[in-house]
């Protein structure tokens, strides 16, 4: 009986990381694969010195096999590849991603070489900037949540966290390409068309974002139903 | 030509292929668009065709294997039987591109070109395999044969009216080509009547063999360049099946049989340029790249004696040139790939293999 009482008296700390399938203890630090040059001791502020010491002492989680220390590693692209992945087939998902980037670059570079010198600077040839910008253009600013009040459920406009916005943008892109395009085109072709359209704020995904914004605007009367 | 944008290795030079020499090794030269349309309707590797479309120009790097081949072609004696040149090397090192470079040299010298872009396509994935109309135990491939005849017509238009047939060919009870008809008619016969197109290919090759070394001067003189990519397909196995579900031998296919006759050096007045290829081959392991491994015993005995030309990965200077070419054409977009460390990473990842480097730079 004394043992169970003692268990109730000590402060509660979570014994596992509060992430979906993570079995790590919370004091494990995340790995940082980037090859940042080691800044000498004198240039660090006291908090940063503490952080450095913590890194040398505390245990670090194992790195994912998809993280690289090379500067070509892009966390947004990795996240998109993970979302496209089906049945754990990362090789196929990564292949589709690289083919998409190649197709975007080919279309833009072809346009670049065929256009006169005056218009060349406006054409964006870097597929990574096109991807980042397109994703930004697809992110919704405000979302809708279903709130039940008085037996009826209302769609209430609600602010979204950054992670949720990024997730929604990527999810919409992928479902749009999977469902609404011609059956016989390859995924990388469909994705490249959709990304290039989103880069110039055209296309079905941006339209879906605008529809969501309009619904939120229409339902602004219910905004006070939100209590969080 | 464009103003040179880099001072280390000048990138593009519009040179006639006759003037290429060792000093130009590592530099790029532009293939004129008219030549690409005529000479290479299907001859270039698919990724290179995409590159031509993207950059709006076709630039080929001048490399030692191609230079070696061209120097042999310049010095050979064309009254003697043709020399066989075999380009061999690991996957992705540039055998097909070197072959195309040498072929462009031949074309600019006014030779007649017989180009089989990939012999592997004739021994696998054939939708229609008809029993031959002329011989009992042979099989025809009408689609492949008529496609090849169309490409041959595009490449060698100016020779078609000059050359005449030397014997009478009978195709069916009602169709025949008389002696003395221009070669163009023979080819039209093959293109229009698909059933006899494989036999027409055989007849065309026979005519060219007979007439290549014929007239040494005057109107009828021409040199014949036979270029076959993936020559190991002629003596390997096929993946085609006959109607009774047994495997087809390459000997039983009309096209292969006629091409093998072309590979023998019992004619004169030309050259035989070939390249081995593992990538399209049937039933060959990926690590095989030497002539003895890919050609097999039968093929090696048939091809011998040949002049082997080895093709390898880029050296430092060639890699540098390729890197600068991509930078010049605005192809390397990732900011890290334009730095020194990124370049070292590219060298490490690709091991200076031309095709792997091209695929890496495609998405960076």
Image: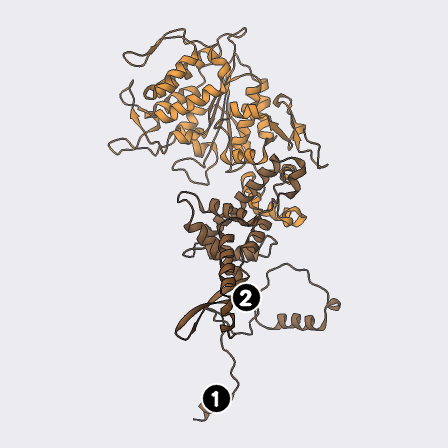
**Which residue does the image show at 52% across and 48% down from the upper left?**
A98
In the image, residue A77 above or below residue B306: below
Q: How busy is the neighbourhood of tag 1: few (under 14 within 10 Å), some, or many (20 plus)?
A: few
> Which chain can be seen in brown?
A
For marks 1 and 2 on the same chain, the one whose residue lies earlier in the sequence: 1
- Vertical placement of residue A32 versus A207, above or below: below
The residue labelled by disc 2 is: A161
Q: Assess disc 2: are there few (<14), some (14-19) or many (≥20) residues with their C-alpha within 10 Å of its C-alpha.
A: few
Q: Chain of mark 2?
A: A
The spot of residue B192 in percent (x, y) is: 36, 19
The image shows residue B180 at horizontal and vertical percentages of 41, 6
* Spatial CA span between label 1 and label 2: 35 Å
Q: Quadrant of the N terminus of chain B?
A: top right
Q: Nearer the viewer, residue A67 or A135?
A: A135
- Left or right: B1 in relation to A173: right
Q: Which residue is mark 1?
A: A8
User: Which residue does the image show at 36% across and 26% down from the upper left?
Assistant: B143
Marks 1 and 2 in Cβ contact (< 8 Å): no
The location of residue A86, given as percent across then percent down, is 42, 55
């Amino acid at each position: 009986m004394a043992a169970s009482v003692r268990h109730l008296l000590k402060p509660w700390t979570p014994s596992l990381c509060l992430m979906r399938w993570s079995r790590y203890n919370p004091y494990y630090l995340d790995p940082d694969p980037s090859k940042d040059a080691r800044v000498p001791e004198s240039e660090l502020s006291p908090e940063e010195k503490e952080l450095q010491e913590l890194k040398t002492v505390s245990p670090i989680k194992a790195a994912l096999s998809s993280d690289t220390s090379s500067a070509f590693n892009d966390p947004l692209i990795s996240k998109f590849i993970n979302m496209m992945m089906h049945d754990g087939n990362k090789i196929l998902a990564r292949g589709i991603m690289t083919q998409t980037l190649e197709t975007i670059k080919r279309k833009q570079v072809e346009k670049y070489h065929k256009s006169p010198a005056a218009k060349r600077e406006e054409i964006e040839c870097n597929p990574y900037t096109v991807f980042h910008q397109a994703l930004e253009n697809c992110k919704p600013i405000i979302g809708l949540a279903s709130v039940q009040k008085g037996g009826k459920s209302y769609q209430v406009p609600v602010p979204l966290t950054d992670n949720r916005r990024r997730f929604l943008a990527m999810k919409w892109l992928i479902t749009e390409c999977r469902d609404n395009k011609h059956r016989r085109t390859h995924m990388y072709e469909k994705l490249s068309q959709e990304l290039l359209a989103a880069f110039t704020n055209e296309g079905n995904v941006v339209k879906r974002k605008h529809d969501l914004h309009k619904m939120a605007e229409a339902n602004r009367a219910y905004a006070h139903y939100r209590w969080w | 030509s464009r103003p040179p944008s880099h001072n280390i290795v000048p990138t593009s030079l519009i040179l006639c292929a006759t003037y290429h020499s060792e000093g130009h090794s590592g530099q790029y030269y532009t293939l004129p668009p008219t030549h690409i349309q005529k000479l290479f309707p299907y001859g270039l590797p698919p990724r290179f065709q995409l590159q031509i479309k993207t950059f709006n120009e076709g630039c080929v790097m001048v490399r030692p294997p191609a230079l070696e081949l061209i120097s042999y072609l310049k010095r050979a004696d064309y009254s003697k039987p043709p020399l066989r040149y075999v380009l061999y090397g690991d996957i992705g090192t540039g055998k097909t591109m070197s072959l195309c470079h040498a072929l462009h040299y031949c074309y600019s010298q006014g030779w007649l070109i017989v180009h089989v872009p990939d012999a592997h396509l004739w021994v696998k994935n054939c939708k229609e395999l008809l029993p031959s109309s002329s011989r009992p135990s042979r099989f025809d491939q009408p689609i492949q044969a008529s496609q090849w005849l169309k490409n041959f017509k595009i490449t060698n238009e100016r020779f078609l009216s000059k050359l005449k047939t030397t014997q009478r060919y009978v195709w069916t009870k009602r169709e025949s080509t008389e002696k003395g008809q221009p070669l163009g008619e023979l080819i039209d016969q093959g293109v229009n009547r698909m059933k006899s197109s494989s036999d027409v290919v055989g007849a065309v090759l026979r005519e060219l063999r007979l007439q290549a070394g014929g007239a040494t001067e005057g109107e009828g003189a021409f040199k014949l360049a036979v270029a076959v990519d993936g020559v190991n397909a002629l003596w390997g196995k096929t993946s085609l099946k006959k109607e009774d579900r047994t495997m087809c031998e390459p000997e039983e296919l009309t096209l292969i049989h006629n091409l093998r006759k072309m590979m023998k050096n019992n004619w004169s007045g030309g050259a035989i340029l070939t390249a081995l290829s593992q990538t399209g081959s049937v039933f060959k392991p990926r690590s095989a790249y030497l002539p003895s491994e890919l050609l097999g015993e039968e093929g090696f005995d048939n091809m011998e004696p040949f002049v082997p030309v080895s093709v390898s990965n880029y050296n430092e200077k060639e890699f540098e040139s390729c890197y600068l070419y991509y930078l010049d054409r605005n192809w390397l977009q990732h900011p890290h790939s334009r730095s020194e460390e990124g370049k070292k990473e590219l060298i490490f990842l690709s091991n200076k293999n031309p095709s792997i480097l091209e695929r890496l730079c495609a998405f960076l």
